[in-house]
Amino acid sequence: MLLKNIYNEFIKILAKPRSYIGIGALTLLICIILFAMKADGSSFISFVTSSFEQTLSFNGTI
């Protein structure tokens, strides 16, 4: 029953053309973030965790 309702809601979402714009924008945003992390992820991680590194000790690789 639940799967049938989920399927019906998915069909309703796909029937509206504006849904494709949102799905496309979300996919593009995810691809940009993944590419940025692939290109320069280690410096970004160190930038984000710099305030934590003062009080915590990190061991290992990400």
Image: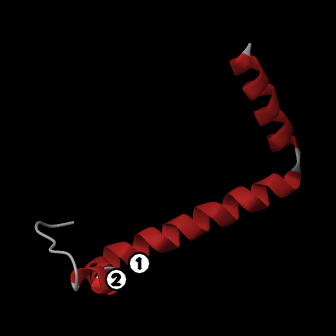
Tell me, for residue 49, which label it has, or none: none
Q: Looking at the rendering, which quadrant does residue 6 occupy?
A: top right
SS at mark 2 in the image: helix
| 9 sits left or right of 55 in the view | right
Residue sitting at x 81%, y 33%:
9
Q: Amino acid at mark 1?
A: Ala
Q: Is residue 38 above or below residue 54?
A: above
Tell me, for residue 36, which label it has, or none: 1
Label 2 belongs to which residue?
44
Q: Residues within 10 Å of mark 1 (few under 14, many from 20)?
A: few
SS at mark 1 in the image: helix
The reply to whether dot 2 and dot 1 touch (C-beta < 8 Å) is yes
Q: Amino acid at mark 2?
A: Phe
Q: Position of residue 3 (x, y in %)?
A: 69, 20
Q: Looking at the rendering, which quadrant does residue 22 occupy?
A: bottom right
Coloring applied to the structure:
secondary structure
Q: Quadrant of the C terminus?
A: bottom left
| 53 sits left or right of 20 in the view | left
Label 2 and label 1: CA atoms lie apart by 9 Å
Q: Position of residue 12 (x, y in %)?
A: 86, 36
Q: Is residue 10 above or below residue 37?
A: above
Upstream in sequence: badge 2 or badge 1: 1
